[in-house]
Amino acid sequence: MKKLFAAVAAFAALSAHATEQLSVAATAVPHAEILEFVKPVLAEQGVELNVKVFTDYVQPNVQVAEKRLDANFFQHQPYLDEFNKSRRTDLVSVAGVHVEPFGAYSSKHKSLDDLPNGATVVIPNDATNGGRALLLLAKAGVISLKDGAGITATPKDIAENPKNIKIRELEAATLPRVLTQVDLALINTNYALEAKLNPTEDALFIEGSDSPYVNILVSRSDNKDSEAMQKLAAALHSEQVRQFIEEKYKGAVVPAF
């Protein structure tokens, strides 16, 4: 009987270790949808993926840094670099997955040429996405920026503003909700998709598929190379995920591998 109990205990211990838990923070669209897609594949490999959906860009990094979650999937490298610098964290990129071309949207105007003098334009208030929005406005010819202004450009870096547009900086998640109240909104694609906007059809101007802002899987240096994390990275780089992204998002999200 003792041998039987020992055998049962050993089997139970083995079973307990057979499935490894991996908790990942993500914004709802497309990140959480992509993670949900790979969940069955990971389960077959002994990894139980728990997806935690967030609506902001701060807590996913905070909770990974504080070891309350294992990883997150919502941001690009410039945002991560700025976050690490400002918050004194040491989060790291595990794998680049896709690009979400950034777009300019309006419910009042059919083209950027229709923007009136003094138009109200809203952009994200975080440093990297705000700079990205200004770069897109400059590329579209709405404004021009001072020499050397890059991803961390601010409204103070505007050199020429021929239409005297008024720029307001708001939290990225709120931008779709104020779209009807402003002339133009520069919206991250994940929030545009959540708001049922189609970037390839509804955006007046959009980044090309060559955008350098690849969305990445992020973790800590102490768990980046764990077996479970590497299985997740491999799953996100699979041909099945490539096809899923291409078929579901039809150009609004572009595979980067």
Image: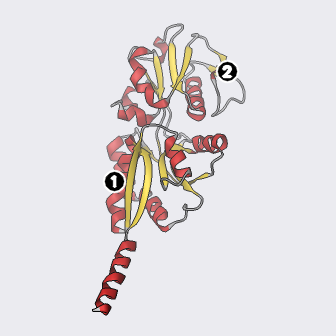
Q: Which is more N-terminal, label 2 or label 1?
A: 1
> How many tags in the picture?
2
Q: Is residue 111 left or right of residue 145?
A: left
Q: Nearer the viewer, residue 179 or 100?
A: 179
Q: Nearer the viewer, residue 136 or 7?
A: 7
Instruction: Measure the alpha-carbon separation of dots 1 and 2.
Output: 42 Å
**Compared to 19, does 250 lie above or below?**
above
The N terminus - image quarter: bottom left
The residue positioned 37% from the left and 72% from the top of the image is: 16
**Compared to 71, does 85 lie above or below?**
above
The amino acid on which the numbered mark 1 sits, given as a three-letter code, is: Phe
Q: Nearer the viewer, residue 89 or 187?
A: 89
The image quadrant of residue 148 is: top right
The residue positioned 39% from the left and 24% from the top of the image is: 177
Direction right: furthest residue: 147
The residue positioned 41% from the left and 15% from the top of the image is: 181
Element marked by disc 2: helix
Give the residue pinned by disc 2.
156
The amino acid on which the numbered mark 2 sits, given as a three-letter code, is: Lys
The residue positioned 54% from the left and 62% from the top of the image is: 223
Kindly check if marks 1 and 2 are in contact, taking CB atoms under 8 A apart as contact.
no
Q: Is residue 55 left or right of residue 221?
A: left
Using the rendered image of the protein, determine whether residue 10 is visible from the camera's viewpoint: yes
Give the residue pinned by disc 1.
37
In the rendered view, how is the structure colored?
secondary structure
The image quadrant of residue 130 is: top right
Element marked by disc 1: helix
